[in-house]
Image (cartoon, rainbow, N blue to C red):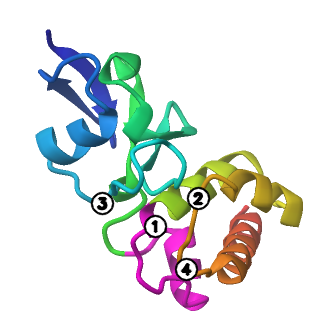
Amino acid sequence: MTISFSINGKTVACNSAEDTPLLWVIRDELGLTGTKFGCGAALCGACTVHLDGEAVRSCQTPLSVVAGKQVATIESLSLDNSHVLQKAWIAHDVPQCGYCQSGQLMSAAALLANNNNPNDSDIDNAMSGNICRCGTYPRIRAAIKTAAAELRSAK
């Protein structure tokens, strides 16, 4: 069975089984490798993508759920680090090992899409499902605040 959906603004048709996790369709069938496999149980956040604008864990989202919907991966932010969040991540020297960063950025992007003036509690709630083994949480929070300020000043 073919399942069609939009990914990063392009319509695709996938032939994987309906119960195949979206993560593996994104990486193996579509060749977009920015989304990472972490735990496979939706606990670490490394595989976070947007589904119709909401942050979801692609390792536990079956392909059947995305039929006819919009999926956005880390590649949708920008390929040249020009997105406001990517610039803030660089300015605050957030990544260490970098493995969790695509999921962190996608969770932060979902937060800022709905709230361009998040407080610490808002940030903590939005980011709570994303684990950073390197412990860069203070830098992540600072980068989100910087990006939010940039978004507010652009309006």
Q: What residue type is labelled 1?
A: Cys
Q: Are marks 4 and 2 in contact (CB under 8 Å)?
A: no
Q: Is residue 54 left or right of residue 120?
A: left
Left or right of residue 11: residue 147: right
Q: Which mark sits nearer the N-terminus, 1 or 4?
A: 4
State the separation of the CA atoms marked 3 and 4. 16 Å
Mark 3 residue element: loop
Q: In this view, does 141 lie to the left or right of 56?
A: right
Which residue in the protein does label 2 denote? 130
Crowding at label 3, few (<14), some or many (≥20) Cα neighbours within 10 Å? Answer: some
Secondary structure under badge 1?
loop
Q: Which mark is residue 100?
A: 1
Residue type at tag 4: Trp
3 is higher (above) or lower (below) than 129: above
Residues marked 1 and 4 touching at CB (< 8 Å): no
| Residue at horizontal 56 percent and vertical 71 percent from the top | 132
Earlier sequence position, callout 2 versus callout 1: 1
The magenta stretch spans which residues? Answer: 81-102
Please give the label number shown on residue 34. 3
Residue 14, magenta (yes or no): no
Circle 2 residues within 10 Å: few <14, some 14–19, many ≥20:
many
Closest to the observer, 44 or 27:
44
* Front position among marks 4 and 2: 2
At label 2, which amino acid type do we have?
Asn
Looking at the image, is mark 3 or mark 1 nearer the viewer? 1
| Relative to 25, residue 111 above or below | below
Q: In the rendered structure, are the residues bearing label 3 and label 4 in contact, judged by CB atoms less than 8 Å apart?
A: no
